[in-house]
Amino acid sequence: MEESIIIIGSNGQIGTELATALRLKYGEKSVVTSDIRQPNTPSQGPFEIVNVLDKELLQSLFEKYKPTQVYLLAAVLSAVGEQNPKLAWDLNMTGLLNVLDLSVTYRVDKVFWPSSIAVFGPHSPKEETPQYCIMDPSTVYGLSKQAGERWCEYYFNKYGLDVRSIRYPGLISWKAAPGGGTTDYAIHIFHEALSKGTYECFLSAETRLPMLYMEDAIQGTLQLMDAPAENLTIRSSYNLTGLSFTPAELAEAIKVHVPEFSISYSNNDPRQAIADGWPSSINDEYARKDWGWNPQFNLKAMTEEMIKNLKQNLETT
Ligand code: AKB
């Protein structure tokens, strides 16, 4: 059967690259991208304006395209969420429930919804954080992701909706800007290293966080969505990671390519407290076992790719 795929929140960091990957795989016309505003560059296929909080409008999208797969990427991330907690809760929770409800009504085959390492908190094990452990998130983003995971599992158990999810760590990419998270420093640093040769980091030198290069993240997402349903033992959200590093280690890796680069650290940024409550590394054995997760990019390879592509961008603009 031909696929009809809707991506909600397609203008963001993940959506931009996922749309390209899905269009390559299923054809341009089979993938409908949607967001609250027009994309910066012309869409390669059908595009619709939609607000995930407007259930009627969202329903008209489901009615028009009768999707077989839905990817819900619209969300408020950790740092921005702390500036407007009620908005973050509303968008992240009501948006998810609207999509889950309509997916049941329209008998969508598969739904993808991203969770995050933000579901963990200060009492979760910090190193090699396991799939199952104490979770006491302290940001509204983390609260919404943790509750969202429970809802996904609930809809799977109660209505048989095939919802699949990944707890993304910090995602590093160069095609689209990050959306207001705590891990965004790991992208800003590359831009500023190349444009200015210096960077003031809002996290401390030794703050180790789990990360993933976008190419791996997209591969992993497609792999999870392709996996036979019977192989999936987790219907909340899968732990996933690629690498873990500190700002100081990342700065050293960048210096290999930009020897004059220097980094300084601010010590009064509210994002530090968020990062301090998160894991420094993740155990993703369930993803490896259930659907063959095997990331390709380590710190050296990721840094090379980022520098190469951003340099090319700078030269052509
Ligand atoms: C954030 O920093 O908020 C996100 C995330 C880890 O989910 N990148």
Image: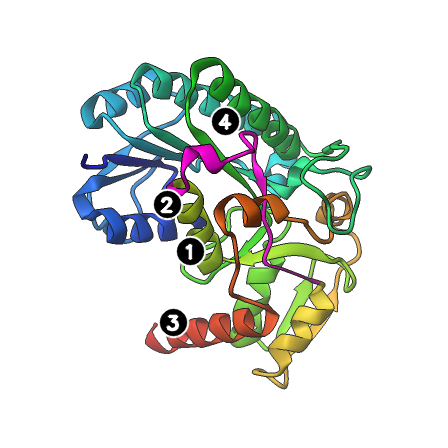
Tell me the CA gap for discs 1 and 4: 21 Å
Residue at coordinates 79% horizontally, 43% vertically from top-left? 125
Seen from the viewer's position, the closer of residues 30 and 255 is 30
Q: Residues within 10 Å of mark 1 (few under 14, many from 20)?
A: some
Residue at coordinates 44% horizontally, 59% vertically from top-left? 215
The residue labelled by disc 3 is 313
Image quarter hosting the N terminus: top left
SS class, disc 2: loop
Tell me the CA gap for discs 1 and 3: 12 Å
Sequence-wise first label, 1 or 2: 2
Tell me: 47 left or right of 222: left
**Marking on residue 79:** none
Sequence-wise first label, 3 or 4: 4
The residue labelled by disc 2 is 11
Q: Is residue 223 visible?
A: yes
Tell me the CA gap for discs 1 and 2: 8 Å
Residue type pointed to by label 4: Leu
Write the start and end of the magenta stretch as one range: 226-245
The residue labelled by disc 1 is 176
Image quadrant in which you'd find residue 69: top left
Residue type pointed to by label 3: Asn
The residue labelled by disc 4 is 91
Sequence-wise first label, 1 or 4: 4
Q: Height in image: 287 above or below 55? A: below
SS class, disc 1: loop
Residue type pointed to by label 2: Asn
- Whether label 2 touches label 4, CB < 8 Å: no
Where does residue 137 sit, x and y in percent of width and height? 72, 33
SS class, disc 3: helix
